[in-house]
Amino acid sequence: MIRLADKKDMEDILAIVKIAKQYMKESGNVTQWAGVYPGQEDFQEDIDKSQLYVCCNDEMIYGVFAFVIGNDPNYCYIENGQWLNDKPYGTIHRIAGNGKVKGVFQEAVDFAKEQIENLRIDTHEDNKTMQHLIERAGFQKCGIVYMGDGSPRIAYQYEV
């Protein structure tokens, strides 16, 4: 089940992110999500904007992701390629799972596809796991975008 996150979910969300950060570090992705990002303030802002979702079952919250419909300022400029189209889109950000339940990424993508047919996502060049999941879900690599801090990300788009 996927539902909007609530402030009462914060402890579970932060525990999932801690697991994801450790996994990234162990799998050779030592710079993405290093330090305090994403942190409680990022997730609280997502909750306040009603754009943070949790994946859960009867026993636990096992995944978290932000989903935003509308233009992402980080996607205005793309280099070494181009977006597939300029139609309205939704973006998946800050996705993480606790490792106990498989398929969090695909659940999030399926949820997002129910909201809008055109999706975008980005990931760090060292995040090989996410690149594999994104491409397996049918996203096409479009180029390089830059985050607010200037760091590059591989940009992908999915269109029906």
Image (spheres, rainbow, N blue to C red):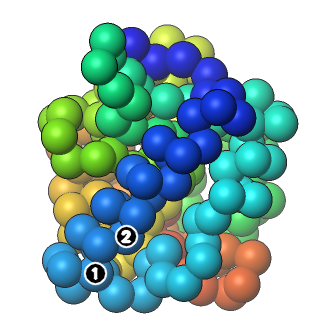
Task: Say what amino acid the circle numbered 2 marks.
Answer: Lys
Q: Quadrant of the N terminus?
A: top left
Tell me the number on the disc at residue 21: 2
The image position of residue 111, as x and y in percent, is 45, 19
Q: Would residue 137 appear left or right of 120 to someone viewing this image?
A: left
Residue at 32% of width from left, 12% of height from top?
Answer: 58
Residue at 40% of width from left, 64% of height from top?
Answer: 18
Tell me the number on the disc at residue 154: none
Task: Say what amino acid the circle numbered 1 marks.
Answer: Lys
Q: Label 2 to label 1, Cα distance in Å?
A: 6 Å
Q: Which residue is mark 1?
A: 25
Q: Are marks 2 and 1 in contact (CB under 8 Å)?
A: yes
Q: Would residue 3 appear left or right of 107 to someone viewing this image?
A: right
The image position of residue 55, as x and y in percent, is 40, 26
- The image shows residue 98, relative to residue 59, as above or below, that is below
Q: Quadrant of the C terminus?
A: top left
- The image shows residue 47, relative to residue 144, as above or below, that is above
Quadrant of residue 131 in the image?
Answer: bottom left
Element type at mark 1: helix
Dot 2 alpha-carbon crowd within 10 angstroms: few under 14, some 14 to 19, many 20 or more = many
